[in-house]
Image (cartoon, rainbow, N blue to C red):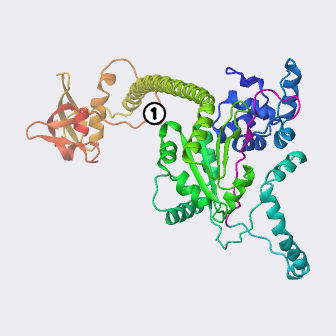
Amino acid sequence: MAGDDFDPGLLSQSQQEALGTYTAVTNQEPSAAIPLLERSQWNVQIAIAKFFDGEAPDPLEEARASLSSSPAPPTTSSRQETLMNGFSQPLGRSNRTRLDPAPRIVPQPENQNVYRAPFILTLFLTPFRILYRILSGPLGLFAYLFPFLPRMLSGLAGSRAQPRRQQDTSGRRPLNPRDTAARFAREFEEEYGPHDLHFFADGYAQAYDLAKKDLKFLFVVLLSPEHDDTSTFVRSTLLSPEVANYVNDPQNKIILWAGSVQDSEAYQVSTALNCSKFPFSAIVAHSPQDSSTSMSTIARISGPIPPSAFVRRLRSAISTHSATLERARASQNEQQATRNLRAEQNSAYERSLAQDRERARQRREEAEARSRAAQEEKAKAEAAEQAIRNLEQWKKWRAQSILPEPSTSGEGVTRISIRMTSGERIVRRFRAEADMEELYAFVECYDITSGETALAETPKPSDYTHSYRFRLVSPMPRIVYDPNQGDSIGSRIGRSGNLLVESIDDEDDL
């Protein structure tokens, strides 16, 4: 399941959520993240802590490896053991030298409240504090003369205590890591003058994370202003052109972080890196042979040392570990290339999917538009057919109520000659007191009333309002007679008249 081509479906829902949270925080490939999560029992907090702080060696895995390896043939050469390696090298250790892990140090925040004991308790503990100050001098001198004893005793205890904060006895105000680094760089330049070294302008934890991310060497320099060899080491060794050129060479990929043990952060770093003598230098780098997230101390340089020897030890440690980092960089670049390729493929797939969705949307909209157009055409056709049926029904209904033609001419009768749109001329008598609408109705229903077939009784169509699509016009002079004015035929036309039927086009309505 931890291979390059793993199936996420093999993970449970909780494991998939843990994997997603871990990769979102660490930006690590799932293939490399799953083994670490498995070693952390799928606990996201523990896995993230191991990724940033480094993963300590697993005693169970070491025991399995020692049992599975074949026993080495007996040798007659005797190994000279010193006091230190006699206690530190356990039985059954493989031939490969395991590097000391370098933990990630995060100083106490500046705004963190410091607990102050009550006055009565402070008064009660005052004799013990005086006794401690009296005994701390001889004990400190003893630890200075025999610096290996505290480390040896801590190794026998089998556990490494968490670095404790240094009590600020110099009166220096605690600052955040970035301001502490700026203060150290300023004081260093004021003490030793202008120089060519480029100190990392942030805290140790930030330099640690950058070295792990970019697979570079973290060069740590710890100074103690109270130490007699500090000034000589800085002026003769650290600021020498040979050391400065080597550290500043971009090909060596070195991040330089320095600090004074008078500051809390640098003091915690010195304790974590097992610093036993000042001035102290160390090189911290990623050790993929231990785990995918571990950082180890690959070299320690304590005390004053000539520049040539100092550079030689730096070059030896870096050249020995460069091949390991190059392989890790190649693997990281390959993973990044794979990630970029996958991102490009996903982006191309999303673009293609978006184009397919857009084309589908356009086809759907075109189909809907055609359907609406067809429905509108059908509705118009049905409305036209219904209008024709209503018109025919209205004509039959209105023809039933048209007044009959008077028999003779005389008073109360108007004789009118009507020229139809077809060219046919009709002469008919109308009652003079009839409305003009009667004349329009006669023209509208002429095709029905002119036949010899008797009209059947027809009801008036419901929900229909008739409007005449023609007008009656007197040619000389031109007068248009409106059927809605309510005047009688006799008052408008007189005893006789000639009228023309003109169709009303749609343009005339506008």
**Residue 337 vertical position relative to residue 480 in the rendered view, above or below:** above
Residue 320 position, x and y percent, is 62, 31
**Residue 301 vertical position relative to residue 384 in the rendered view, above or below:** below
Q: Residue furthest left?
A: 476
**Image quarter of the C terminus:** top left
Along the viewing direction, whichever of 242 and 91 lies nearer the viewer? 242
Q: Which residues are magenta?
A: 90-110
Task: Name the dominant secondary structure of the magenta segment.
Answer: loop
For this view, does 478 lie left or right of residue 93? left
Along the viewing direction, whichever of 439 and 242 lies nearer the viewer? 242
Residue 495 position, x and y percent, is 16, 40
Along the viewing direction, whichever of 402 and 409 lies nearer the viewer? 402
**Residue 330 vertical position relative to residue 190 in the rendered view, above or below:** above
Residue 417 shown in magenta: no
Q: Is residue 199 visible?
A: no
Residue 95 shown in magenta: yes
The picture quadrant where one finds residue 333 is top right
Residue drawn where x is 47% and y is 31% of the image: 459
**Amino acid at pointer 1:** Lys
**Image quarter of the N terminus:** top right
For this view, does 388 lie left or right of residue 495? right
Q: Residues within 10 Å of mark 1 (few under 14, many from 20)?
A: some
Residue drawn where x is 83% and y is 53% of the image: 150
Tell me the element at label 1: loop
For this view, does 173 lie left or right of residue 495? right
- Residue hosting label 1: 460
Residue 506 position, x and y percent, is 26, 33
Residue 284 position, x and y percent, is 65, 42
